[in-house]
Amino acid sequence: MAEVHTQVREEQLDPEREARRQLALAQIRQYPDPALRMRAREVEDFDEDLARLAERMAALMRDANGVGLAATQVGVLRRLFVFQAGEDEDPVAVVNPHIEARGEERQICEEGCLSIQGVHVEVERTCAVVLAGQDTGGGDYRRELTGAAARVAQHEVDHLDGVLMLDRTTDQQRKQAMSVLRPRLVAAGVR
C-alpha cells in the first residue's frame, strides 16, 4: 500500500513505471516556474479541447504517481484540476472548482507536490469540505469529501489561485524546504 502525501504517492516503482513517472514529471512545471504563482481563469468553453486537456492531465497524474494535478501545473491558466478521490476510483476532472463549505475540524498532515519534488511539509487543512464546480461537459459537480480527498481538493484549488503548500506551512518548515530546493535552483541557474 502506498503512502499518500497530497499529490504524491510514495512507493517503490518497477523500472518501467519509474521511467514513465520521470517522463510525466518532465511535463509538469517545477518550482519556481512562474505559472505556479499565477491565478487561473474561469473556464467558459466546455469543448473537446477542455475534455482532451482533462484526459491528458489525468494520464500525467497517473504516470507521475500522483493523486491530484492542477492545470497551472502543466502551464495552462484555466480553472481545472484532476484528482483521485478514492484509491479504487477513477480520476475526476473538476472545472471552475471552489470549496463551497468547510468542516470545523482541522488537521496538520505532511503534504507533497508533483511540482515541488522531494519536499514534504506539514500543512494544516480542514478535514471535510464540499467541493463544487462543473464537469468537462459543463454539468454541475458537487461532492462531500473527507480525509485525504478533502486535503487533495484544497491543495488543488490553492494551485489554481497561485498558492503553494510552501505558503501554507510554518516558517521553520518553509526554511527546511528551501534548504532542499535552493541547491537545485542554483544548479539549474535560477536566481
Image (cartoon, helix red, strand yellow):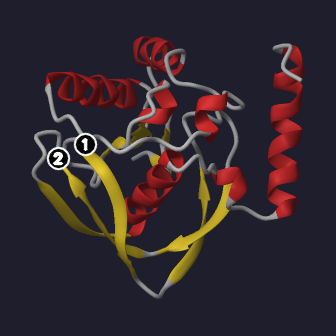
Residue extending furthest toward the bottom: 104
- Residue in view at x 68 percent, y 31 percent: 31
Side (left or right) of 165 relative to 191: left
Say what amino acid the circle numbered 2 marks: Asp
Q: Which residue is mark 1?
A: 93
- Residue in view at x 40 percent, y 69 percent: 147
Q: Which residue is mark 2?
A: 135
**Residue 139 vertical position relative to residue 144 in the rendered view, above or below:** above
- Residue in view at x 51 percent, y 24 percent: 28
Answer whether labels 2 and 1 touch (C-beta < 8 Å): yes
Nearer-the-camera pick, 23 or 189: 189
Where is residue 44? Give x, y as percent. Answer: 24, 40
Quick one: quadrant of the C terminus? top right
Residue 37 sits in quarter: top right
Where is residue 163? Give x, y as percent. Answer: 61, 51
Nearer-the-camera pick, 39 or 119: 39
Kind of element beneath mark 1:
strand
Query: Is residue 26 visible from the viewing direction of this image?
Result: yes
CA gap, disc 2 to disc 1? Answer: 6 Å
Query: Is residue 4 visible from the viewing direction of this image?
Result: no
Side (left or right) of 131 relative to 18: left
